[in-house]
């Protein structure tokens, strides 16, 4: 019934019980999980996970936090692997790519180059993008416009209402997850409640950004608990309350929005679409 549009199921936090985690998600009503890669080194892992579980699909890309070690050879390998996998229906996007101007020590110019080159790959293969947009909303959008990429998801969106409007106008969906469950996250909750419902998709970013009920801090200042894809059900419940809609109505809308952002999901409607 629910789709988690951003989950790092390959992370080491799941090594001990990955099958149990996906089984728990299925039991909770999670029928689709999108697995973004973060570096060339885990391309095969996320692809393999997506092919072992009918609920999972994947994306290939180089995350900005892995940009220090990434160069032209990595971009060449990304293009080679996308070329080899383009007929694989479980490859749904280029991602996770983008810019991070919050973490110290990352070279802004190098990040931007790497991001822009990956946008070219997305454009060349007509694939949407899964975007990391931390403290970089305007710069991310500028590169999207320059490359002509107009489809995908701005994951864990935390920009202004004006920035959200520009992303939506450009054709992007905005991902909301654990942060929306904290009462003190007023800006995020306001966006979740007021943006056009057609602009929103749900996610967890598991194992990160645990929701309020898993956090060790009632004010949402910490997210140390392990998040899992099953928690997208709770995020959906909070979103339905904020929007004043039924969970069934929200599920139908989130499916349509997820397919609009990642059109290859449509091939898995028999597994993932709300029933």
Image (tube, grey):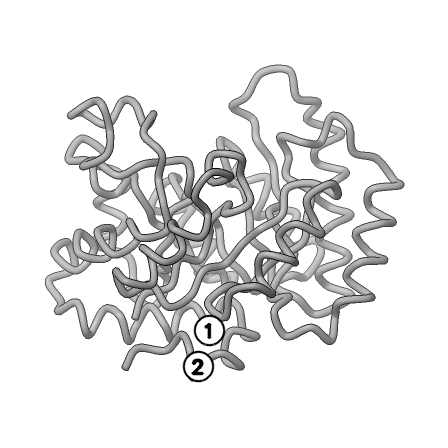
Above or below for 255 versus 229: below
In the shown orientation, is residue 249 left or right of residue 96? left
Is 129 located above or below residue 37 in the figure?
below
Quadrant placement of the C terminus: bottom left
The total number of labels drawn is 2
Residue at 40%, 55% (x, y): give it: 22
Q: Nearer the viewer, residue 204 or 165?
A: 204
Residue 84 coordinates in the image, percent (x, y): 82, 66
Residue 227, given in percent of the width and then of the height, sits at: 35, 39
For the residues bearing labels 2 and 1, Cβ distance under 8 angstroms: yes
- Quarter of the picture containing the N terminus is bottom left
Q: Which residue is mark 1?
A: 259
| Residue 115 location, quadrant | top right
**Sequence-earlier tag: 2 or 1:** 1
Q: Where residue 184 sits in the image (x, y, percent)?
A: 18, 30
Seen at 63% across and 75% down, the residue is 89
The image quadrant that residue 202 belongs to is: bottom left
Q: Which mark is residue 269?
A: 2
Q: Looking at the image, is 184 positioned above or below residue 238?
A: above
The residue carrying pointer 2 sits among few (fewer than 14), some (14 to 19) or many (20 or more) residues within 10 Å by Cα, namely some
């Amino acid at each position: 019934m629910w789709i988690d549009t951003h989950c790092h199921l390959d992370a080491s936090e799941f090594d001990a019980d990955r099958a149990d985690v996906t089984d728990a998600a299925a039991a909770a009503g999670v029928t689709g999980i999108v697995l973004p890669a973060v570096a060339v080194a885990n391309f095969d892992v996320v692809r393999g996970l997506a092919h072992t579980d009918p609920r999972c699909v994947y994306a290939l890309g180089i995350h900005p936090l892995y940009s220090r070690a990434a160069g032209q050879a990595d971009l060449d390998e990304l293009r080679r692997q996308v070329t080899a996998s383009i007929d694989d229906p479980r490859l749904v996007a280029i991602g996770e790519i983008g810019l991070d101007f919050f973490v110290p020590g990352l070279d802004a110019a190098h990040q931007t180059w790497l991001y822009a080159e990956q946008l070219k790959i997305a454009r060349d293969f007509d694939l949407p993008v899964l975007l990391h947009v931390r403290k970089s909303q305007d710069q991310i959008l500028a590169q999207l416009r320059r490359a002509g990429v107009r489809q995908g998801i701005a994951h864990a969106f935390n920009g202004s209402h004006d920035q959200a409007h520009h992303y939506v106008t450009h054709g992007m969906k905005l991902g909301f997850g654990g942060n929306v469950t904290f009462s003190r996250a007023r800006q995020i909750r306001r966006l979740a409640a007021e943006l056009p419902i057609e602009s929103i998709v749900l996610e967890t970013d598991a194992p990160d950004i645990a929701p309020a009920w898993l956090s060790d801090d009632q004010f949402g200042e910490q997210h140390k608990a392990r998040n899992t894809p099953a928690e997208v059900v709770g995020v959906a419940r909070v979103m339905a309350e904020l929007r004043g809609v039924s969970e069934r109505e929200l599920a139908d809308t989130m499916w349509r929005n997820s397919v609009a952002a990642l059109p290859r999901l449509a091939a898995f409607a028999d597994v993932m679409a709300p029933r």
